Amino acid sequence: MKATRLLFPRLLGLLLGLFTLPVLASGSDKPTVAVLYFDYEGTNAEMNLLKKGLAQMLITDLSAHEAVHFVERDRLQQVMDELELNQSSRFDQATANKVGKLLGARYLVMGGYFDVMNTLRVDARVVETETGRIIRSVGAQNTPEKFLALEQELARELRAVFEELSAPTGESGKAPAKPKPVRKPRKLTRDTALRYARALDAKDRKDLVLAKKELSAVVKAQPDFQLASKELALLMK
């Protein structure tokens, strides 16, 4: 009986310890990051859909950094559908934490964007899922015609944050591994990015006819936009 009384607290302590371990990518020591849809702060209802295109582009660019695992946008959409969160839902901290935990994400990228007087502004923050602590805030702005430059600047700022977070202890002075290069389109306007986002939204709603139509128009207007070409090729199979 005495041995049983001594064993029980040890087992309980072990179980509690397991629950407090940081959330990591399955089968890997890479921290997992989820890029959530950003909140639109403007008045143009159609611009609300841009969040899907922006999220996909950021995930693609940031995934080149191999020290961190990024959740795919399709998985994020699946969790949002399971929680019955529609495209206009805003991510308050409680909802973001719930989504992050379901995605197994240690860190979240969330934020907002707005457009005014021919300027598009995007602000992002990296948040620790478990505590809600803001690790870093970054932002970028440009004209709608230079949407690609804006997105790339934001991706560079976020990549720098994750390079710091994923650097091994005691190796902060060591040069981080160079991410794999990702081919960029020559240019990309907000309107083309918005049409790409409408295609992603149509795909999410299982309207594959509209998704193919929108993607075909995007690829015709922007043949070097590889993300759109890849999405279209997958739908055509």
Image: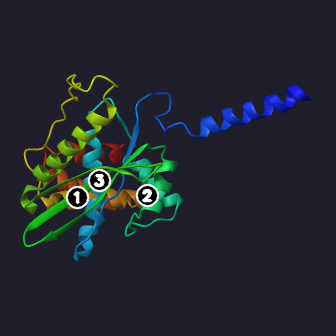
Work out how far the residue at label 2 is from the one at label 3, CA to CA, in angstroms: 12 Å
Location of the C terminus by quadrant is top left
Tag 2: amino acid? Ala
| Residue 190 figure quarter | bottom left
Residue at image location 47% in from the left, 61% down from the top: 94
Helix, strand or loop at label 2? It is: helix
Q: Position of residue 21 (x, y in %)?
A: 54, 36
Q: Is 72 located above or below residue 79 in the figure? A: above
Tag 1: amino acid? Asp
* Mark seen at residue 96: 2
Q: Earlier in the sequence, mark 2 or mark 3?
A: 2
Density class for disc 3 (Cα within 10 Å; few <14, some 14-19, many ≥20) is some
* Mark seen at residue 123: 1
Q: Is 9 located above or below residue 145 in the figure? A: above
Helix, strand or loop at label 3? It is: strand
Q: Where is residue 80 in the image (x, y as percent from the top left)?
A: 46, 58
Seen from the viewer's position, the closer of residues 172 and 224 is 172
Helix, strand or loop at label 1? It is: strand
Whether tag 3 and tag 1 are in contact, CB under 8 A, the answer is yes
* Mark seen at residue 125: 3
Q: Taking the image as drawn, is residue 61 in sight?
A: no
Left or right of 41 in this view: 27: right
